[in-house]
């Protein structure tokens, strides 16, 4: 009896360790089962999404994408070197008085164009006229002394031949004659000096050009030592533009310049939208600036219409070479990827294919293609971001036919070129 009682008591009161073990095993079964269920649901939904994406892609492939295309053409393309230049006049003169006196009259208008020798102002000439009169009177006095001394010399020579006077007296009279001759020559110099002062009292233009603002008004006393001067004259026709060019571009320009070739230079405004003037390369500086790595070029322009103004900033563009019959397409047709540059070529079946190309000179909105494309082939110029290899397209030809300067290879105004850039690419 005692043994049975202890067994029942033991079975009716379970221990803590025996109840936790089945619960742990139950969770070990539930968690993997939940993971398998979730993975199955993911595979099911992912398969449907992939199938939907494939269907969407297939529909997109069957649906034509509207694009704008343009045929590649041949044109003459110029290779340019550009730089931000400064308009510099050939001659700039500050007109100053060479004598002291009162400014009596001003004969020019501010901003007027004058020619060399034109009368600009008059300084009071009366003091210098008085000096001229005094010098002329002194010369007459000295000339009469000289004439009398010469007569005496002739008499002394006759008396010396008759042995009536000594040789010393004859020599003294001869020296007196030469003394008076020197005095007369000094008098003549004083007369010329007085006449020159009278010439300086009339201030004339030393060069042809445009006068600036008047610095002194009539009635003031001016001096030859004044620093400001009367007015500044600047030569506008012709005029030059000085612009820096990278030293790497110097060899190809220097060879053509030394051979005597005339290199054309165009001057554009700051925004490079309007061409102001066309000239030619005049000279090249004799040294490279070590701080900037550039060398200065000077171009000359006729400037007949005065479009270039002194100290004006312009974008100078030097034509180095003209490449004839280059294949040209709009720059917007060029795409760039990890494998280089390429274009979307429109085939006869209205689908596109990727064609790698090598690009060259960029000019305005167009770019030259050196390899990978022939003239007449259609390329996508707008809408390429929605295309893939083999995409079906609905082609709309570009309505605006852009030119690259016609047969002469002239530049399109507004070329987006940075100063000093060579504008030739060799990237594939």
Image (spheres, rainbow, N blue to C red):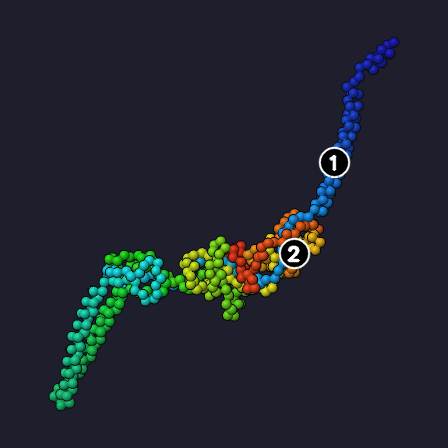
Mark 2 crowdedness (10 Å alpha carbons): few <14, some 14-19, many ≥20: many
> Within 10 Å of the Cα at label 1, are there few (<14), some (14-19), or many (20+) other Cα atoms?
few
Residue pictured at 70% horizontal, 45% vertical: 60
Q: Is residue 235 above or below residue 183?
A: above
x then y, percent, for residue 406:
56, 62
Numbered tag placed on residue 45 in the rendering: 1
Q: Is residue 372 left or right of residue 181?
A: right
| Circle nearer the N terminus (2, 1) | 1
Asked whether residue 317 is in view, the answer is: yes
- Image position, residue 387 (x, y; %): 67, 49
Q: Is residue 421 visible?
A: no
Residue lying at 15% horizontally and 78% vertically, measured from the top left:
144
Residue 59: image location, x then y, percent = 72, 44
Residue situated in front as seen by the camera: 223 or 239: 239
- The part of the image, by quadrant, that contains residue 33 is top right
Q: CA distance from mark 2 to mark 1?
A: 43 Å
Which numbered disc covers residue 11? none
Residue at the location (24% across, 60% down)? 104
The image quadrant of residue 426 is bottom right
Q: How many marks?
A: 2
Mark 2 residue element: strand
Mark 2 lies on residue: 378
Residue at 52%, 65% (x, y): give it. Answer: 253
């Amino acid at each position: 009896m005692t043994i049975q009682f202890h067994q029942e008591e033991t079975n009716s009161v379970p221990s803590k360790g025996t109840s936790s073990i089945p619960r742990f095993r139950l969770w070990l079964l539930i968690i993997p089962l939940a993971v398998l269920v979730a993975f199955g649901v993911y595979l099911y939904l992912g398969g449907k999404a992939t199938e939907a994406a494939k269907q969407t892609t297939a529909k997109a492939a069957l649906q034509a994408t509207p694009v704008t295309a343009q045929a590649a053409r041949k044109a003459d393309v110029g290779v340019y070197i550009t730089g931000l230049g400064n308009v510099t006049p050939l001659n700039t003169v500050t007109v100053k008085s060479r004598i002291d006196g009162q400014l009596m009259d001003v004969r020019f208008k501010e901003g007027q164009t004058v020619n060399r020798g034109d009368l600009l102002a008059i300084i009071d000439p009366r003091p210098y006229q008085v000096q001229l009169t005094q010098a002329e009177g002194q010369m007459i006095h000295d000339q009469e002394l000289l004439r009398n001394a010469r007569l005496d010399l002739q008499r002394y020579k006759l008396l010396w031949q008759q042995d009536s006077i000594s040789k010393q007296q004859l020599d003294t009279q001869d020296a007196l004659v030469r003394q008076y001759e020197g005095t007369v020559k000094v008098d003549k110099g004083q007369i010329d000096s007085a006449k020159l002062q009278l010439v300086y009292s009339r201030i004339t233009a030393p060069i042809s050009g445009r006068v600036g603002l008047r610095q002194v008004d009539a009635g003031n006393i001016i001096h030859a030592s004044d620093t400001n001067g009367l007015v500044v004259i600047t030569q506008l026709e012709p005029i030059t533009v000085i612009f820096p060019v990278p030293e790497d571009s110097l060899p190809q320009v220097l060879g053509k310049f030394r051979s005597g070739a005339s290199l054309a230079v165009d001057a554009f405004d700051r925004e490079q939208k309007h061409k102001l003037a066309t000239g030619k390369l005049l000279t090249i500086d004799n040294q490279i600036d070590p701080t900037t790595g550039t060398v200065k070029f000077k171009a000359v322009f006729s400037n007949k219409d005065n479009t270039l103004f002194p100290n004006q900033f312009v974008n100078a563009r030097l034509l180095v070479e003209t490449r004839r019959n280059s294949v040209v397409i709009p720059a917007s047709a060029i795409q760039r990827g990890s494998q280089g540059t390429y274009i979307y070529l429109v085939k006869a079946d209205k689908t596109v294919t990727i064609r790698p190309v090598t690009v060259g000179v960029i000019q305005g909105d167009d770019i030259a293609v050196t390899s990978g494309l022939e003239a007449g082939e259609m390329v996508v110029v707008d809408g390429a971001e929605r295309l893939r290899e083999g995409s079906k397209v609905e082609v709309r030809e570009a309505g605006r036919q852009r030119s690259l300067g016609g047969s002469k290879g002239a530049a399109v105004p507004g070329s987006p070129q940075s100063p000093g850039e060579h504008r030739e690419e060799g990237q594939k």
